[in-house]
Image (cartoon, rainbow, N blue to C red):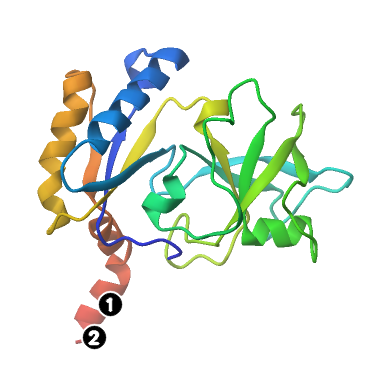
Amino acid sequence: LGFQPEGLLALSVAPGDQGYDAARARGYYRDLLERVAALPGVRGAALSENRLLRGAILSRAVYPEGQEKKITAGGRSAHRTNIVTPGFFRVAGITLLYGRDFAEIDCAGCRRVAIVNQTLARLAWPRQNPLGRRFRFEQDKPPIEVVGVAKDAKYRNVREDPVPFIYLPLTQNDAASMTLHVRTDTRPEAALLPALRNAAQAIDPGMPLAEIDTMTHFISGALWMERVSALLLG
């Protein structure tokens, strides 16, 4: 999978759908992280625009700086992206192979940065060090600098081949909805779910909460075809 599902919980919120503007949504996300991180049994918490293994937004074409051709993979020129907060890779159990994680220094007015996966780094800068390299999205200015390379993972389903992928920091990008990922020592991990729900509702009782469950549950659902086939064959 490229990440560690055991001991990982998820909870999705969409403040943008409730009339929050970008600044108010950022405040909600900040409060949510602080409240959840303080819960007993929580080892870490982070946000991403798309839940692990749920998919990601198909973004625009990517043009490495100094190259006229856009990156293509599997006949597609657009690549998937995910907006995340600092600590997401540690919480999710995704290995950072080179470089660094996002940090508070990656502010809205600072140089734009991204973390790419192995596949995109190989396609964009073969046999070169990708750190410090820059790229642009179509009609996008200024360029974005690569500060880290993450290990490939499964992004949409467990059967997919390796695909190019780009992570962007929430500090430099807006997100109308986010999924909270929580790493816990609590066993069974599902026992922490009511506390997560309470923490989110304490900030805004009217905020709808979605996809509140363990990552192992979501993965079990993603493997329903294999499970049904095995059951029928048995």
Q: Residue furthest bottom?
A: 234
Using the image as rendered, state which of residue 36 and residue 50 is in the foreground.
36
- In percent of the image, x 38 and y 33: which residue is there? 178
Question: Is 32 above or below relative to 216?
Answer: above
Q: Quadrant of the N terminus?
A: bottom left
- In percent of the image, x 37 and y 40: which residue is there? 46
Per the image, the residue denoted by label 2 is: 233
Q: Which mark is residue 140?
A: none
Using the image as rendered, state which of residue 35 and residue 71 is in the foreground.
35
Q: Residue 212 is drawn in which quadrant?
A: top left
- In percent of the image, x 29 and y 30: which residue is there? 34
| Dot 2 amino acid type | Leu
> Where is residue 111 shown, x and y percent of the image?
69, 29
Decide: marks 2, 1 in contact (CB < 8 A)?
A: yes
Question: Is 172 above or below relative to 91?
Answer: above
Q: Is residue 47 visible?
A: yes
Per the image, the residue denoted by label 1 is: 229
- In percent of the image, x 57 and y 38: which residue is there? 168
